[in-house]
Image (tube, rainbow, N blue to C red):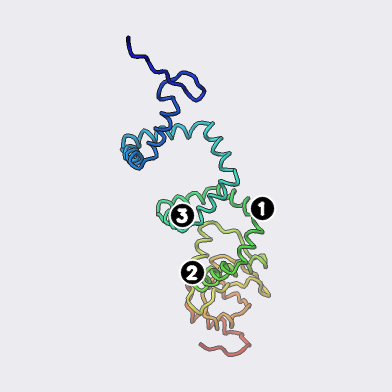
Amino acid sequence: MGRKKKIHLDENGNPCKYWQTPEFKAKAKAKRQTPEYKAKLKAWRDTPVQKAKSKARNKAKWQTPEYKAKEKARRQTPEWKAKQKTLRQTPEAKAKQKAHREKPENKAKKKAKEQTPEHKAKEKARREKPENKAKDRARHQTPEVKARHKAWCKTPEGKAKCREYSAKKKAKRLKRDILLDKAGRKAMAEIYANCPDDWHVDHIAPLLGKTISGLHLPKNLQYLPAWVNHMKGNRWEESWIEHTIDTPLEEKIKAYQLNYEGEKWHE
């Protein structure tokens, strides 16, 4: 007589193949947990052929509507958001993000994106939301931000920006500012950035004089030592219309000393 064939049963007692039995599954699971098996599997997955196959398979999977919907729902859960927030706060993640931002290609990509009309409109809408305005105000009141801003204002770049901002704010208050194009804004920033130490950026025609009101724009700006600017004050003479930022200082001093009735200034 021939050897009797063994019948294998699954979890429900139904006939099945040997590899479908609980015994085989338990053995296979235990085998997969061994260090040797894991190392062998990792080495196999790291081969160029398997990497390419896995990448192609995952890419196709990620493009399916079902996967996208499932992932979107998962990312909206409080648990996922909390986990991601915790991960972003780790030193390793911060260092990695900083290194990523510092790459020239990523800086250029970010700058190009920020110049698009869509991004500008989106950012403007975001800033105009009451909750974001309140959040920004609260953030600017924190000791860390105040200290960082104070330190930045002491740098040459910070000093120039603060002077430019103060002048623009004053011009806006007096309704003497105009909308400049990109070249005009760049020229304005360069004028304030290149102002010599202990000198002032002065409006040739004062913003709010007795007989004239000039505009806050590049061609109406000049550099003056502080004492000369105080001597000129808010006065205006028709002959000064020829003055520009490149007019020699001696010529300006002579012009401003005429009809000056205040204290005798000297350098």
Q: Relative to the observer, which residue lies in front, 109 or 144?
A: 144
Which of marks 2 and 3 precedes in the sequence?
3
Q: Which of the labelled discs sits on residue 157, or is there none?
A: 2
Q: Relative to the observer, which residue lies in front, 159 or 236?
A: 159
Vertical side of 128 occupied by 42: above or below: above
At label 1, the amino acid type is Lys
Given this view, does label 3 or label 1 mark the residue nearer the observer? 3
Which of marks 1 and 3 precedes in the sequence?
3
Q: Is residue 61 left or right of residue 75?
A: left
Q: Judging from the image, what secondary structure is the residue with disc 2 in?
A: helix
At label 2, the amino acid type is Glu
Q: Position of residue 236 (x, y in %)?
A: 62, 76
Q: Judging from the image, what secondary structure is the residue with disc 3 in?
A: helix
Q: Do the CB atoms of the residues marked 3 and 1 lie less than 8 Å apart?
A: no
CA gap between label 2 and label 1 equals 30 Å
* Residue visible at 44% across and 58% down in the picture: 95
Vertical side of 86 occupied by 71: above or below: above
- What quarter of the picture does the N terminus occupy? top left
Q: Do the CB atoms of the residues marked 2 and 1 lie less than 8 Å apart?
A: no
Q: Which of the labelled discs sits on residue 129, or is there none?
A: 1
Q: Position of residue 258 (x, y in %)?
A: 58, 84
* Residue visible at 52% across and 48% down in the picture: 116
Q: Relative to the observer, which residue lies in front, 188 or 126?
A: 126
Label 3: which residue?
93
Residue 205 picture quarter? bottom right
Q: Position of residue 179 (x, y in %)?
A: 60, 58
At label 3, the amino acid type is Ala
Q: Position of residue 8 (x, y in %)?
A: 43, 20
